[in-house]
Amino acid sequence: MSSAATSAASNAANIAINAAIAAAVQQQRDAVIAHFTGHQALSPQSAIAADTIDPALQVALKYYRDNGVIRDAGADRLYLDLDVLAGLKAKAKRTGRNVLITVMVLAVLVAAVVVVLATW
C-alpha cells in the first residue's frame, strides 16, 4: 500500500474513532437531560438533589452546569433550564454543520492527493 493510501486509511480510522467517542459523549449528555426531564426538574421549585444523578454521568453533568443548562437551586439541588438547553443545541447544530463542511472539503482534498499520487 502506498504512503498516501496508508495515510488516507489512517485518517478514515481516526474519523471513525472520533465519531464513536462523540456518540458515547452524546449518549451520556442525553442521559443527564432524560434524568432531569424524567423527574420534571425544570425550575428551582422542582429541583432534584444532586446526589440522585448517576456518578458515571458527572462529566456530562459538569458540561451542562458549565454551560448554564443545569442550574443550582440551592441546598445542593439542581434543575434543567430548557431555554438555555435550546440555545446550546442551536449553537451545536451550527457548529456541527460547519465541521461537516470542513471535513467534506478535507476529504475531497485528501482523495485528490491520493489520485494524483497514484497516477504519478
Image (spheres, rainbow, N blue to C red):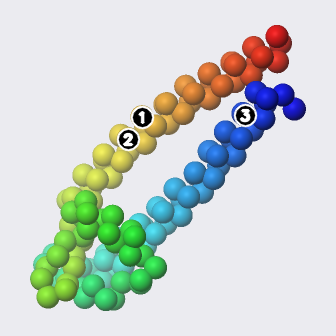
The percent coordinates of residue 58 (x first, y second) are 38, 75
Question: Quick check: 101 above or below 79?
Answer: above
Secondary structure beneath label 1: helix
For residue 46, above or below residue 97: below
Residue 75 in view of the camera: yes
Report if the CB atoms under discs 2 and 3 are less than 8 Å apart.
Answer: no
Mark 3 surroundings within 10 Å by alpha-carbon count, few (fewer than 14), some (14 through 19), many (20 or more): some
**Which residue is at 13% across, 79% downward?**
73
Whichever of labels 1 and 3 marks the residue nearer the N terminus, that label is 3
Q: Which residue is mark 2?
A: 95
Q: Which mark is residue 7?
A: 3
Coordinates of residue 6 in the picture (x, y in percent)? 78, 35
Image quarter of the N terminus: top right
Please name the residue shown 63% across and 53% down the image: 17
16 versus 21 height, above or below: above
Q: 6 and 106: which one is in front?
A: 6
For badge 2, the amino acid type reads Thr
- Labels 1 and 2 touching (C-beta < 8 A): yes
Residue 104 horizontal/vertical position (percent): 56, 30
User: Label 1 amino acid?
Assistant: Asn
Q: CA distance from mark 1 to mark 2?
A: 5 Å
Q: Please tell me which of labels 2 and 3 falls first in the chain.
A: 3
Mark 2, other Cα within 10 Å: few <14 / some 14–19 / many ≥20: few
Of badges 1 and 3, nearer the viewer stands 3
Give 113 or 77, whichever is nearer the viewer. Answer: 113
The residue tagged 1 is 98
Quarter of the picture holding the C terminus: top right
Q: Is residue 42 visible?
A: no
Q: Amino acid at mark 3?
A: Ser
